[in-house]
Each structure stands twice: as C-alpha cells, then as structure tokens.
Image: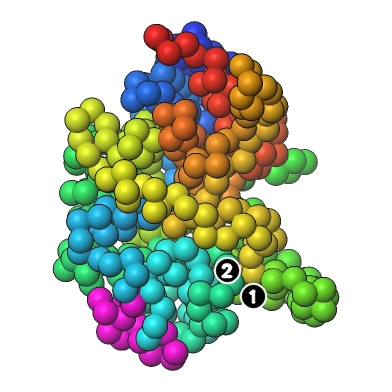
Amino acid sequence: MSAAKPRGFVTPEFAPLVRALELYVPARGPGGAVLSVHHRGQLVANLAVGTRDRDGALMQPETLVMGLSTVKGVTATLLHIIADRGIIDLAAPVARYWPEFAQAGKRDITVHELVSHRAGLYMLPDTIERIEDIYDWERMVGALARAKPAHAPGRDLGYHAWTFGWLVGELLQRATGALFSDLLRECIAKPLALTGCYIGLPDSEHHRVAKIIQVQTGEPPRSGAARSLVSQAPALAQAGIGMGIGLGSKVTRALGLRFDPAQAMRAMAPPGLSQLNLNAPAFLRAVIPSVNGVFDAISLSRIYAALANGGELGGVRLLSRAAIDRARADQSVGLGRVIPFPLRVKMGYHRPVSLGVRVSMFGRDRDLGIASADAFGHFGLGGSGAWADPERELSVAVVTNCFVGRLPADLRTVGVCTAANFAADRRSPSS
C-alpha cells in the first residue's frame, strides 16, 4: 500500500479533511500524521497518512505519537476533573495542598493562576544543570518549590512551556495522594476506554510509537537523535544570537511590550536541549506532563469529544458543564512574556486558530469555518494538537511525527481546523 494513500475511514461530509491531512506530510521523504474527528458524539474520521519512520513503515490510525505540548490540554483536563470532584479548589492557594510551594513569595499563588500560566514560574530553575535532570521528578518539583516568580503572580501571562507539567502534576499528586500516571489512567483513560493515552509510556507500548522525524531540506536523512525545531535554540545562542537576545529584551522593554526574549529562552530551552533524543526510551518513559504525552489520535479526539458535548461521551461523564464553562473562559487576550502571539489562553488550554468567512443568514451573522470563541484545546510545537468546539459539538485531534510537510510547521493545524469547521457547518442536523 502506498504511504501517500490515506488509511482508515472518513464520512462523506468530512471528506475535505483528507486533503488537509495530506498537507501534513512532505511530498517526498519520510513523515506521517493521524487525524481523528468526532461530531455530535460520533466518530466521523479516523485517518492516517505517510510513514511512521525513515524506513517506510506505514503510519496507521492506531499508531502512537509523542505530541509535545499537546499533552498540556490533557494535564489541564485531569486537573479540572479533580477540581470538579471537590478535591481541589481552583481559588485556593497552591500551598494549601503543597506546603513547600509557599517559599520565595509564592504563598498566595492560586491554583487558578497556576493553570492559567500566570504564576510567573515559567523560567526553568538555575539548579537544572543538564538535560537528564528533566527525568528526575523530585529534583524538578523541589527546584520549582524553591523558585522565585519572575514577576508578581497573577499580573502577566507567561507560557510555562516546561514547568507547567511538574507544577500541575505535583499539585495533583499532593492533593490526591496518587501518582500522576495512575490518576490519568483512572480518571480519563479507563472511563473513556482509550486505546492510547500515556504520560509516562509503559515499556510494553514502545513498539507502537512512531519515530519523530525532523525533515531538513538539503541534508541527507540522519539516523541519529531526532531533534525538534526548538532544540536548536541553545546552539544558536552559543553561536552569538545570545547577544541579540539581550538587545531584544532591552528593545521590547523600551517599547512597553511584555515579551522578553531572554526570559523566553530560559523558559523554552533547558541546558543541553540540543542533545535531547525525542525517540529515546528514557524520554518516552519519563513523566513530564507538559511535553512528552504519547497518544493515538482517536484517544485525544474522544477526550475532547466529551468536553465538546457538555462533559459526557457515550454515557460516561468526564466533567460537569459548569466545570467546562470555567475551563474555557479566556484568561488573557494579549501578548505574553514568553510567546509573542495572542494565544487567547484559557485555564490550561488556548483557543485554536482557523480561517473562514463571516456571512449573514436569515438575519443572523455566522462565522463559517472560524473556530468559535468557546473552542479550546492545546497544540504542540511541530503540528500536533487537539481541541473541542462546544458550539459545533466538534472535536479534532491530529498527531504527527514530522515538523514540516507540504505546509510548514504549525500552519498545518490551521488548515485542519478550518477544514473541520467548514465540514461541521455544512453537515445537516439529521446526519
């Protein structure tokens, strides 16, 4: 079977998604993607295209893929489930559940501020000396408990690229007395009968995982460690860009902008990041709830299908409607200190980006193809992502092992989001 031919199924109304998925993979060379879509609680697409490695093995709908920051949305969902059960109060100080967290001026930081990226703890602690430190849960949470916020908590948005997972994960463990991976299994994976939802991949599942591939134009394929785009940042800084970052910080401050390139570097790039092998069993095995979730697309789509359907899917209630309303409320609409883009951050999620048209029908304005204001989810660097659109009762999940396809990087998620929204808008109520 040709790698270019999509595998799986799609209903006629959502057939345009086939072309959107094909844009995910290179015209020539390795790389693949899997797309899963639920509409009104029904699975309407589950498609794979391309290859799962450089040797040409086909990507399949059931293939597991490591999705980088896509995992943050699953981590946030787990927090909202525990809060919905009354075990955690979102308005309470984090230190109520994690007493050591009160150090260095953090006594009053609330759970709400933490999950909304407004705690000021986005910079990795100076005590992190080598990339292997990220595998040591106790070292990471201990360092963050001692860390001082970069600014007054609650005031500014700063995307907690790495630290979000350890902060929220330790909060959950302290509040419940259970291990994070056990909570994920018991509260989400088991109730929804998910076939692939892991943060801390068991060794028994490693054979199902696609290899992350960085396509580098003009260079021959390499068999060594897979490296994400962001992993090049430390090497670039050592080559002299660090001086430019310092100047950039002064310029942005002079212009009154919140974005700070120096802080962004410390938030995004742990020491030794360029040596991180994204395919290494040690990385996949580690529990890092902000960057290394491993999923099949249908599991992500089922999670967000429940969120798009008022918190319930197939008779299983994941969250109350009130909890979902809280989770999807905008927390910040401006530029952040770490990412100079208006993410429309919500409580552990952000709003997806799509393109469309605004039309008037029967005296009512409607945005066709545009993600609704209530849509929420999370994307990962390189093209993976998943989200729910409650207005359309739509959930979409896409996972990929290549950072560049026929469209570059994260622009591919915009194409899939737009195509899915148009398809949902066209689908008749009786379908």
Q: What is the image's colouring? A: rainbow
**Dot 2 corresponds to which residue?**
158
Q: Is residue 165 left or right of residue 83?
A: right
For the residue labelled by badge 2, is the local secondary structure a helix, a strand or a loop? Answer: loop
Judge whether residue 97 is colored magenta: yes
Residue 48 in percent (x, y) is at 47, 24
Tag 1's secondary structure? helix
Using a 10 Å C-alpha cutoff, classify the residue at mark 1 as few (fewer than 14 neighbours), some (14 to 19) or many (20 or more).
Answer: some
Circle on res. 263: 1
Q: Residue at x 49, y 86 (%)?
A: 148
Residue 117: percent from left, percent from top:
50, 66
**At 65% from the left edge and 42% from the top edge, which residue is drawn?**
409
Farthest front residue? Answer: 363
Q: Position of residue 283 (x, y in %)?
A: 41, 58
Q: Give the foreground label among 2 and 1.
A: 2
Within the image, what quadrant is residue 367 found in?
top right
Please provide the residue range marked out in magenta: 93-106
